[in-house]
Image (spheres, grey):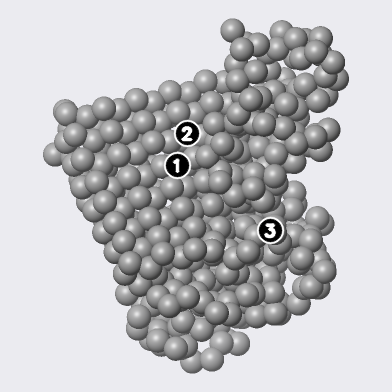
Amino acid sequence: MSEVLTFLETLEARSQQRAEEPTWIAARRQAGAARFEAMGFPTRRDEEWKYTDVRAISQTNFALAENAEFSQAGAAALTLPIDAYRLTLVDGVFSAALSDLDSLPQGVQILPLSQALSENHEAVGGPLGRLTGVEFSPFAALNTAFMEEGAVVRLAPGTVVEKPIVLQFLSRANTKPTMCHPRVLVEAAGRSEATLIEHYTGEADAQNFTNVVGEYMLDRGAILNHYKLQEAPLGDYHVASMHVEQSRDSRYSSYNLNLGGALVRNDLISDLNGKGAEANFLGLFFGQGRQHVDNHTKVNHNAPLTFSNENYKGILGDRAHGVFNGKVFVKRDSQKIEGFQSNQNLLLSDRAHIDAKPELEIYADDVKCSHGTTTGRLDEEAVYAMRTRGVDEATARALLTLAFAGEVLEAVTLDAISERVELAVAGKLPERFNLTGLVETASALNE
């Protein structure tokens, strides 16, 4: 309980610095703080946190950032080389200098949360917290209590955004560990379409805590391609609660790519609430050293004639620990749905470990659903076969490891993101190669 009090004391000190704010915001903060105090940090006795120990977070005395200072050169080295609209937060504080929000097309709004609240707080108050309330988890409650900054993205009906929208979260190597609790709110109106990239990165020696809550609302026929590239410093802690609401004929595609962080927890939920709604979850988590990466996903088929497909792949070396818990839930009378789920894991060392739990919960009878998980190691015969073709052992292992991730990487259409993942997984390769050909070669060697 002393850990909870430490966070609440930091909250109280912060509240005394704030200017007067709308009543509803103050009330939600109080509700978040009260819920967090009642729940406390989760422990491994809690089923949802059975394999993830968060004491490294709860026992650290984190400060709150006061500014967004970050060198232009340092930020440039970390920024994805993509022509995009960009909103940047540094340790949770908005940086206008590192953002690029000029010349937004008609029908597109991209604002820091603080600006959206100051300009029209009532418009934000309705959707904010509707999907992910304080009851969802202690971390969601904590986020609500500290909620100050984040990003608001709004797309008008029929708007197609040609360039990606990048939300960049930078973590600094501060003299004292720092925490931030950003909030992301996306409202995609009917028949709108956009690519959203959330990019978490930072200075190599950073040891901070990011606790983000994202709410994504897709109206009828909206399309959102959502990339989450998490390559935080290896000393950072990262907790993300992401909730998607999908109306009729909407399509949501998640590319959840986890490469960094000391302790990582992702909760991703999609509610398919209208006929024709489609959710695609593609995930890749790569762990080394003593990294811990926990992915919890859930697709709720709340309406008939809905579709979901999930494919998560884990690659773990050294003493890394991975967790995958995926659930497909089919509501009563949600007939003629299709829900598919696959989790495959590759262990690169004897001390790497994965806990996998795929689940189906079905209350309708006219459905097509499947799920499964596998865990294995590199095929030594395939490694040998590549060496006989003149490939050194390290490169052969790197290539075969990358081939394992191929199904997910082939779906990534942005080269800048693919190259970051390839470099993390396989290192610097001798030359650029054809991933499709590599996958085919590896498959042939395994036959």
Secondary element at image label 3: loop
- Identify the residue at image location x=28%, y=48%: 277
- Identify the residue at image location x=49%, y=63%: 162
Indicate whether 248 appears above or below 35.
Answer: above
Callout 1 crowding tier (Cα within 10 Å): few <14, some 14–19, many ≥20 = many
Residue 138 image position (x, y, % from top left): 48, 57
Residue 378 image position (x, y, % from top left): 68, 17
Residue 183 image position (x, y, % from top left): 50, 67
Q: Is residue 205 left or right of residue 354?
A: right
Residue 372 image position (x, y, % from top left): 43, 23
Task: Name the residue nearer the viewer: 17 or 358.
Answer: 358
Residue 281 shows which numbered tag?
Answer: 1
| Amino acid tagged 1 | Phe
Residue 311 shows which numbered tag?
Answer: 2
Q: Is residue 316 left or right of residue 45?
A: right
Callout 3 crowding tier (Cα within 10 Å): few <14, some 14–19, many ≥20 = some
Indicate whether 51 appears above or below 208.
Answer: above
Residue 80 shows which numbered tag?
Answer: 3
Q: Is residue 275 visible?
A: yes
